[in-house]
Image (cartoon, helix red, strand yellow):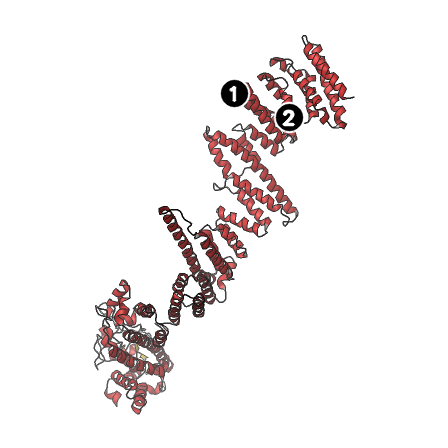
């Protein structure tokens, strides 16, 4: 009778009030109210087009919500809600068509336009009275504080302690009722079969009577769809009630503490946000306000050096979603870390740090990792940062998908792998931040020491460089103990970015080689990375790979590598290939020969570069050639055609011909002649030119004396004798200089013998007809003076050649007038040689 005499929704509200009342809990009234609410609260259904056309009216939405600004009367006026809800509708017979679709929020009232009646099966839902009664009950409960500001201008709570406790009691009672009777029970419990439920509520009988022509199966489907939508709405309401309970519980806890002091600890932005915040905002959109109020409460305890365990447990019990397990762990960790910082006992401090790390590992990875790591760093607990980040990464990716993604070459199509990889790398950024802190602290201390030394007398100031290096080495060692290659990559990137290359090369992990290989493949022109890679290979015994990289590095066309460095790379490559661990395969042998040839050509290029630099000061083209010679290694043909020949670098041409084993006597003799002419033609006195000439010849003889085709001995003797004759140098100077160069005396005698036998007119043309005979006499005299140094078995043959030279000279002198002095000298020399044969 009560549900028939009262508005169904109001009747449900009354039943709900009795069912949740503390006064009637456990009694018959509580049981009757609950049964009445469940049995007579109606059921949801869809409004059909035929009902609207048959009755020539529209049905308005009856969805209710906790809006305190809209009055609720017994004639079921529409209400608005601000909590999320699915699209809803309600039954009624007195609403105009303009209110058919009601907006979900009062904000949208003025923008709402009139819409025609829905003419398909997706018509708005007519929710049950139970549903509407719950929304109305919650709305009336929260109406007094809905638009109330949380604090006044002095940051005092506008919700008093007793009001807060009373509201919390009502909310908890409703929450208990909903937990005892689930959303499924409220929407479907004790429902009679569909065919007979038309008599349950008069509000719905008209609908079903007017739709009796519809198939029973279709009506049942529509009813089930309506129930699903109502369950969704009730689930949203249930979540809102739980959240409201936690918010009011938090506010109750805050008001039992010095509330104003808690608020004054907030930042200016947070204070401003709190002043503008209403309880409606706190319930719906401002969860961050709850968060920073909790943090301020915990900080109040920590500031007073009080334990946070009790208040943390209370927060976890009363508002577990606002103050999660990780929040409790963070608070406890902060407390322990403060204890560790203030501890004077090293063992006690270590124990506190280890305990903190243990509880953080258990709560990982749902932790404010950055905040905890910063606290670890402030306590110089670097090992804790490494271990905690590794645990977070492992727990966030238990299947090691991110590691597989990295080991598999980071394929672009593997999105899941990339996500796990990025997650791990994001955790490991904390290790980089820790290293940055250590490095920056060291730099700051160094700057302060330098400033102090500049203002006071120099003293023995303790250096921080060695201690910082030890700290970084310790962190590196601890990081490398983690088996995850991604944390190794993070470490390598940091060391590389801070140019700590020696520390990087001290690492012997295989992950370093893989990191360097990938880095080189991505930055093929980065000389530093390539240089690090070959050093890593050489240090770890992979000499063949190191030689390959050194070869590539030497051949790289770059302005960042000088020719000296290229030669050094090739030298190291040859040394690596000659290492005993490389092996003696045919491939390795061929590669070694190629490296040796490249090294020889590079050394020739070095000579070309040296001569080109000498020309650069007075030749613009030579200056450009210097840059080109440093930019890359050239082959032997390019060096000759592009550099040595155009710039008349005669010694370089000779070096190139010798390196290429070129066998063109005329070309080689031409180059030697140009070398001699270029020296003689330089300005200076006769003596100076003579010294330059024979000094240069001595250097060239040392370099090319054993080279065969590139050392035309006979041509050189003739050219030197001609230059000596032209310059009117002392007689016999050429043989004297050649003998001091440790050239083959027998060959010297042979070539002089040939020149004597030719009896050329060139000497007379140059102004001294007897120049060659005088030089020949000097050659034989030098031989006689040093006869004891001649090998016994060759002595007779060499002296015989010397006698032939003397005889040839005498024949020439006999044919010429005024040669008595020369004849006398030759006969004395002849007698002397004869005595040497005895």
Q: Quadrant of residue 144?
A: bottom left
Q: Earlier in the sequence, mark 1 or mark 2?
A: 1
Residue 501 in the image: x percent, y percent?
49, 50
- The residue under label 1 is 684
Q: Is residue 500 left or right of residue 836?
A: left
Q: Residue at x 70, y 10 (%)?
A: 815
Q: Is residue 193 left or right of residue 538?
A: left
- For the residues labelled 1 and 2, the Cα–Cα distance comes to 24 Å
Q: Quadrant of residue 697?
A: top right
Q: Nearer the viewer, residue 363 or 401?
A: 363
Q: Is residue 426 above or below residue 678?
A: below
Label 1 residue SS: loop
Residue 612 in the image: x percent, y percent?
50, 31
Does the residue at mark 1 contact the one at mark 2 (Cβ under 8 Å)? no
Q: Quadrant of residue 284?
A: bottom left
- The residue under label 2 is 740
Residue 199 in the image: x percent, y percent?
30, 88
Residue 426: image tag: none
Q: Is residue 622 visible?
A: yes
Q: Residue at x 28, y 88 (%)?
A: 23
Q: Is residue 511 above or below residue 649?
A: below
């Amino acid at each position: 009778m009560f549900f028939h005499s009262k508005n169904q929704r109001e009747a449900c509200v009354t039943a709900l009030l009795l069912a949740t009342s503390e006064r009637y809990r456990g009694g018959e009234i509580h049981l009757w109210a609950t049964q009445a609410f469940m049995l007579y609260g109606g059921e949801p259904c869809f409004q059909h087009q035929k009902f609207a056309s048959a009755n020539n009216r529209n049905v308005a939405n009856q969805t209710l919500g906790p809006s305190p600004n809209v009055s609720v009367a017994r004639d079921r006026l529409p209400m608005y809600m601000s909590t999320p809800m699915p699209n809803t509708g309600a039954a009624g017979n007195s609403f105009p068509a303009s209110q058919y679709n009601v907006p979900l929020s009062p904000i949208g009232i003025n923008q709402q336009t009139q819409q025609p009646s829905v003419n398909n099966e997706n018509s708005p839902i007519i929710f049950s009275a139970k549903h509407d009664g719950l929304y109305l009950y919650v709305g009336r409960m929260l109406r007094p504080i809905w638009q109330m500001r949380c604090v006044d201008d002095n940051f005092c709570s506008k919700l008093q302690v007793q009001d807060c406790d009373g509201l919390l009691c009502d909310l908890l009672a409703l929450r208990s009722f909903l937990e005892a009777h689930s959303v499924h029970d409220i929407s479907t419990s004790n429902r009679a079969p569909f065919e007979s439920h038309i008599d349950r509520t008069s509000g719905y009988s008209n609908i079903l009577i007017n739709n009796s022509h519809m198939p029973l199966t279709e009506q049942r489907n529509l009813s089930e769809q309506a129930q699903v939508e109502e369950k969704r709405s009730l689930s949203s309401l249930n979540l809102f009630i739980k959240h409201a309970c936690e918010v009011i519980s938090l506010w109750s806890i805050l008001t039992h503490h010095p509330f104003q002091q808690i608020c004054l600890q907030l930042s200016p932005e947070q204070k401003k946000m709190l002043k503008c915040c209403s309880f409606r905002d706190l319930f719906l959109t401002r969860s961050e306000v709850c968060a920073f109020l909790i943090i301020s409460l915990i900080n109040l305890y920590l500031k007073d050096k009080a334990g946070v365990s009790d208040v943390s447990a209370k927060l976890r019990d009363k508002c577990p979603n606002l103050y999660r397990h990780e929040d409790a762990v963070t608070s406890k960790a902060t407390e322990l870390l403060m204890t560790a910082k203030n501890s004077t006992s090293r063992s006690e401090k270590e124990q506190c740090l280890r305990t903190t790390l243990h509880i953080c590992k258990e709560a990982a990875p749902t932790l404010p990792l950055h905040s905890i790591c910063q606290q670890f760093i402030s306590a110089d607990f670097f090992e804790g940062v490494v271990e905690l980040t590794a645990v977070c990464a492992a727990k966030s990716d238990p299947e090691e998908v991110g590691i597989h993604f990295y080991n598999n070459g980071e394929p672009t199509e593997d999105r899941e792998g990339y996500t796990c990889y990025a997650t791990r790398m994001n955790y490991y950024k904390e290790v980089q931040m820790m290293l940055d802190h250590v490095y920056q602290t060291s730099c700051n201390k160094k700057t302060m020491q330098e400033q102090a030394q500049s203002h006071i007398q120099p003293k023995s100031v303790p250096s921080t460089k060695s201690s910082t290096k030890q700290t970084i080495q310790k962190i590196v060692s601890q990081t490398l103990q983690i088996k995850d290659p991604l944390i190794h990559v993070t470490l390598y990137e940091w060391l590389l970015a801070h140019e700590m290359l020696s520390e990087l090369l001290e690492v012997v992990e295989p992950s370093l080689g893989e990191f360097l290989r990938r880095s080189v493949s991505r930055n093929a022109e980065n000389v530093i990375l390539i240089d690090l890679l070959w050093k890593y290979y050489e240090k770890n015994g992979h000499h063949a790979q190191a030689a390959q990289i050194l070869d590539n590095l030497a051949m790289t066309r770059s302005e960042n590598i000088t020719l000296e460095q290229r030669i050094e790379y090739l030298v190291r490559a040859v040394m690596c290939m000659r290492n005993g661990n490389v092996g003696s395969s045919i491939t390795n042998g061929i590669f070694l020969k190629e490296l040796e040839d490249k090294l020889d050509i590079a050394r020739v290029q070095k000579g070309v570069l040296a001569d080109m630099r000498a020309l650069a000061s007075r030749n613009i083209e030579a200056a450009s050639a210097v840059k080109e010679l440093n930019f890359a290694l050239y082959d032997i043909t390019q060096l000759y055609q592009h550099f040595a020949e155009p710039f008349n670098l005669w010694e370089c041409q000779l070096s190139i011909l010798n390196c290429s084993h070129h066998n063109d006597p005329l070309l080689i003799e031409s180059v030697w002649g140009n070398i001699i002419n270029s020296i003689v033609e330089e300005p200076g006195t006769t003596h100076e030119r003579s010294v330059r000439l024979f000094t240069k010849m001595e250097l060239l003889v040392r370099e090319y004396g054993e080279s065969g085709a590139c050392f035309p001995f006979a041509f050189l003797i003739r050219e030197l004798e001609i230059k000596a004759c032209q310059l009117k140098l002392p007689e016999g100077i050429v043989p004297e200089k050649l003998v001091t160069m440790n050239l083959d005396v027998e060959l010297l005698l042979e070539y002089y013998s040939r020149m004597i036998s030719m009896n050329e007119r060139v000497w007379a043309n140059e102004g001294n007809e007897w120049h060659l005979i005088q030089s020949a006499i000097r050659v034989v005299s030098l031989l006689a003076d040093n006869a004891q140094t001649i090998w016994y078995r060759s002595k007779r043959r060499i002296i015989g050649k010397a006698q032939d030279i003397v005889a040839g000279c005498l024949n020439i002198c006999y044919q010429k007038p005024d040669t008595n002095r020369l004849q006398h000298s030759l006969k004395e020399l002849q007698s002397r040689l004869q005595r040497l044969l005895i």
